[in-house]
């Protein structure tokens, strides 16, 4: 039987948490590369929280996915046919080519990766956009110094695991926050954080115990009640790296379940001379990707950087896996093995 392409489309915009009916899975013919294009068979798809934003029409830093179009996402795969100079069948490549098995792409935005350096899927996590986010956000905004206390939320996830390990390499005391004892054990024992707090327990008591001297850098991945517990513990001159607020991504547009005036927060920003900065990796990161990759490969080779992936089998299971990501069901960087 002839091979087909498999694609996951955005059927409708979610109201609150996405449901399987928001997606549509279709089989289409395998595309044929035009002159200057490469046909790639994608083997892994990265599932990331930002995709919830692309499903929405709310104003943001990037355009929404159009209804009926292939969901956006980064992939890693192998070239099967090439009509573009510099690429040959068998080359391993990564790029942003969406929730699909095959696509024809131009070399712009296609990164050639060496499968001898790391497993292909690592190019979507520790060596990909989430790893770059952690590296650039700490370097540019968090700026942790040896001896400082760094707190990282969603610590067992794609970004959090890298943030905490880089902060350890920089000589900091690192406290993770994660959901459940299994994730906390992993963060302490496998990633080497000094401690990990379970956000399902009494956050205030656990933070008092883990950070009696306060917090110098807070890496924000979740927002909501975790942020509310961390914020009063920031020390003078602390930095808050606003990477994401996943706990708020399913809030229905226009509503604000964690609302209320930010006044008390902003008063403390002055009194404590805090720096709170949001950032998007694409503004800072990609021009520095070669430098990041070199440094990260070095840490991976000398054993100072561990990483955990949560691999879901089959592109048809991507919608369910993505829905789970927004509920904390993933354990490590979530990737889909496409076939
Ligand atoms: N600014 C940028 O350029 C940029 C780039 C990449 C990612 N990000 C952001 O970074 C954050 C982490 O992304 P990631 O790819 O590393 O995801 P991830 O941590 O691998 O997965 C998401 C994790 O978030 C936690 N979570 C989900 N819902 C939650 C809730 N209601 N309350 C508390 N925790 C919740 C869960 O961990 P627990 O079970 O441990 O709670 C879940 O496993 C996200 O906010 C994402 O949008 C930003």
Image (cartoon, rainbow, N blue to C red):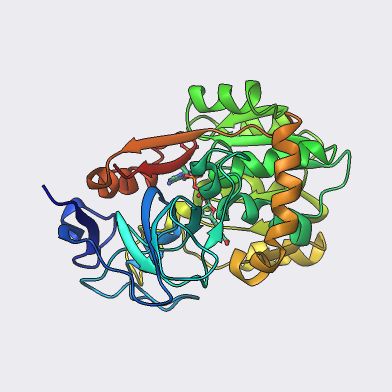
Residue 215 x/y as whole percent: 76, 44
**Residue at 36 percent of width and 60 percent of height:** 251
Q: Is residue 174 left or right of residue 245?
A: right
**Residue at 52 percent of width and 69 percent of height:** 109
| Residue 148 falls in image quadrant | top right
| Closer to us: 78 or 53 | 78
Residue 154 against residue 185 in the figure, above or below: below
User: Number of marks in the image?
Assistant: 0
| Residue 286 falls in image quadrant | bottom right
**Residue at 57 percent of width and 21 percent of height:** 185
Residue 243 x/y as whole percent: 60, 58
Locate the C terminus and report the quarter of the image it occupies.
top left
| Residue 18 falls in image quadrant | bottom left
Residue placed furthest toward the right: 146
- Residue 294, can we see it? yes
Residue 53 x/y as whole percent: 40, 65
**Residue at 20 percent of width and 71 percent of height:** 68
Q: Is residue 103 left or right of residue 275?
A: left
Residue 146 x/y as whole percent: 89, 41
| Closer to us: 108 or 295 | 108
- Residue 240, can we see it? no
Residue 306 against residue 215 in the figure, above or below: above
| Closer to us: 285 or 325 | 285
């Amino acid at each position: 039987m002839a091979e087909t392409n498999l694609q996951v489309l955005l059927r409708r915009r979610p109201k609150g948490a996405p449901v399987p009916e928001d997606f549509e899975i279709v089989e289409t013919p395998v595309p044929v590369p035009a002159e200057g294009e490469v046909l790639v068979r994608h083997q892994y798809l990265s599932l990331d929280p930002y995709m919830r934003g692309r499903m929405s029409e709310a104003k943001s830093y990037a355009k929404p996915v159009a209804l009926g179009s292939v969901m956006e996402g980064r992939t890693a795969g192998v070239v099967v046919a090439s009509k573009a100079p510099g690429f040959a069948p068998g080359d391993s490549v990564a790029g942003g080519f969406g929730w699909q098995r095959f696509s024809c792409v131009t070399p712009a935005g296609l990164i050639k990766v060496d499968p001898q350096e790391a497993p292909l899927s690592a190019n979507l996590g520790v060596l990909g956009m989430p790893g770059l986010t952690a590296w650039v956000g700490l370097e540019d905004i968090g700026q942790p110094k040896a001896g400082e206390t760094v707190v990282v939320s969603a610590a067992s996830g794609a970004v959090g695991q890298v943030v905490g390990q880089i902060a350890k390499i920089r000589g900091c005391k690192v406290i993770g926050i994660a959901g459940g004892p299994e994730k906390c054990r992993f963060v302490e024992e496998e990633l080497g954080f000094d401690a990990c707090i379970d956000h399902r327990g009494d956050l205030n008591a656990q933070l008092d115990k883990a950070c009696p001297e306060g917090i110098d850098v807070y890496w924000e991945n979740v927002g909501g009640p975790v942020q509310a517990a961390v914020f009063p513990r920031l020390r003078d001159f602390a930095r808050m790296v606003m990477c994401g607020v996943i706990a708020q991504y399913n809030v229905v547009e226009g509503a604000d379940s964690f609302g209320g005036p930010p006044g008390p927060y902003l008063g403390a920003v002055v009194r404590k001379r805090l720096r709170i900065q949001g950032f998007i990796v694409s503004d800072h990161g990609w021009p520095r990707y070669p430098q990041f990759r070199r440094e990260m490969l070095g840490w991976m080779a000398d054993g100072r950087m561990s990483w955990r992936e949560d691999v879901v089998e089959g592109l048809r299971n991507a919608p369910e896996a993505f829905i789970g990501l927004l509920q904390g069901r993933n354990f490590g960087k979530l990737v889909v093995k496409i076939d």
